[in-house]
Amino acid sequence: MSQSGVTVEKAGAPFTVVNDLPRSSPGAKHALVKSVYVALNPVETVMQKYGVLVQDWPAVLGSDFCAQVIETGPECTKLKKGDYVYSECRLGQKAYSPFQETFLVDEDYVFKVEGELTPAQASTIAVGTLTSAFGIIVGAKVPLPEPGAKVAEKDEWLIVLGGSGTVGHYAIQIGRLCGYKVAASCSPSNKSVVLKLGAQAAINNRGTPEEQAAEVQSITGGKYSIVFDASALSNKAAAKMLEASTASPKYYTTSEANHYDMPDGVTSYYVLIGKLGQDDDLGKHVSEETKKMIPSLQGHVASGVLTPLEYDVYNGTGFESLATALTDFGEGKIKGKIVIRLQD
């Protein structure tokens, strides 16, 4: 049985709507799902332009999604037909990618839509939440509280660089959830955004690395051990901040793949959630940690402790609209978080 979707023939080729994609059958612990909403992220543009993370061509891409279960594998116990699920897909793997009518999900790597969460909201959550959780919970070895647990505020700060972006949005909330005071860097115009999310202080990211480090020192008195670079652009500022920290041990975590020198005594962790579902050692690490964290993160989303991003629904539905939106997004014609409804 064939189905429609959006493909890329080769690196640098345009997004194209096709109607001859194969429809997969779920394995033992998989579900076949109908793609309902997708949210756009920069990773789709990177994969389309350069072929990064793509495992076979022509490629079906995607990252953030919300989908409805239509069939489950024989050992799938957590999902049933009709459930709405959301997550990050296995990037670059055609059968698991959401830019098509149906695709596969691993039941251990998806969140279920619960509570007051809508499918459109759900499609915006997973990439930012998982990236932040890996940066803070996994990379800096911070315990993730169970849903409903109250964690007393620590006399310690968590520094989030890039607090007004998608990843920063969730990093601030996860930091507060774990009991930290949070200082987040952003432009002066976005100060109110990070404070509304729960940060107690905003750092001017227009300053030099030395100026940003001095501002952090003034705010925190050096009482911080973790700097999470949610922007993946602020390694120099992070290094200066960690030099000034009085805490031990110290952690630098980031979603940037390139490795940077940090001061002595700093443990660095590089978040690579794009390895989800892959069979090498790093892929197995990402998959296992994702499986561990999803139940608690799902509960925190359902209870409203972790809140979705603000987003706009694209003016148009279906795969033709998706192809147009992807092209416009890659050319910088679309700003902010965009969600596309693919099917009813």
Image (cartoon, helix red, strand yellow):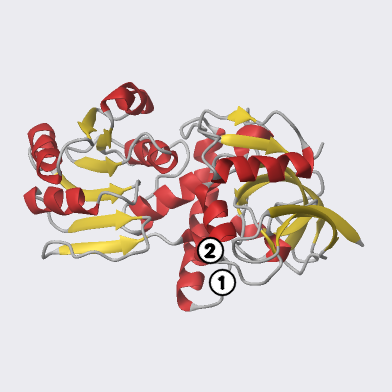
Q: Is residue 326 above or below residue 268?
A: above
The percent position of residue 251, horizontal first and vertical second, equals 22, 57
In this rendered view, identify the residue nearer to me: 156 or 259. Answer: 259
Residue lying furthest right: 1
Question: How many labels sit on residues?
Answer: 2
> In front of the other: label 1 or label 2?
2
Query: Which secondary structure, mark 2?
Result: helix
Quadrant where the image shows the N terminus: bottom right
Kind of residue indicated by mark 2: Tyr
**Residue 37 in view (yes/no):** no
Residue sitting at x 71%, y 52%? 99
**Residue 249 locus on image (x, y percent):** 16, 59
Closest to the observer, 145 or 331 = 331
Q: Which mark is residue 123?
A: none
Amino acid type shown at disc 1: Gln
Question: Is 47 placed left or right of 56 in the picture?
Answer: left
Counting from the top left corner in percent of width and height, residue 106 is at 66, 61
User: In this figure, which residue is indicated by the disc labeled 2?
Assistant: 50
**Tag 1's secondary structure?**
loop
Circle 2 Cα neighbour tier, 10 Å, few/some/many (<14 / 14–19 / ≥20): few
Please give left or right for residue 298 compared with residue 67 in the image. left
Which of disc 2 and disc 1 is earlier in sequence? Answer: 2
Residue 311, relative to residue 111: is it above or below? Answer: above
Which residue is the extreme one toward the bottom? 280
Residue at 52% across, 57% down: 46
Left or right of 76 in this view: 284: left
For the residues marked 1 and 2, what is the alpha-carbon distance in whole angstroms?
A: 20 Å
* In front of the other: 317 or 73: 317
Which residue lies under the disc numbered 1? 278
Q: Where is residue 79 in the image (x, y as percent from the top left)?
A: 73, 52
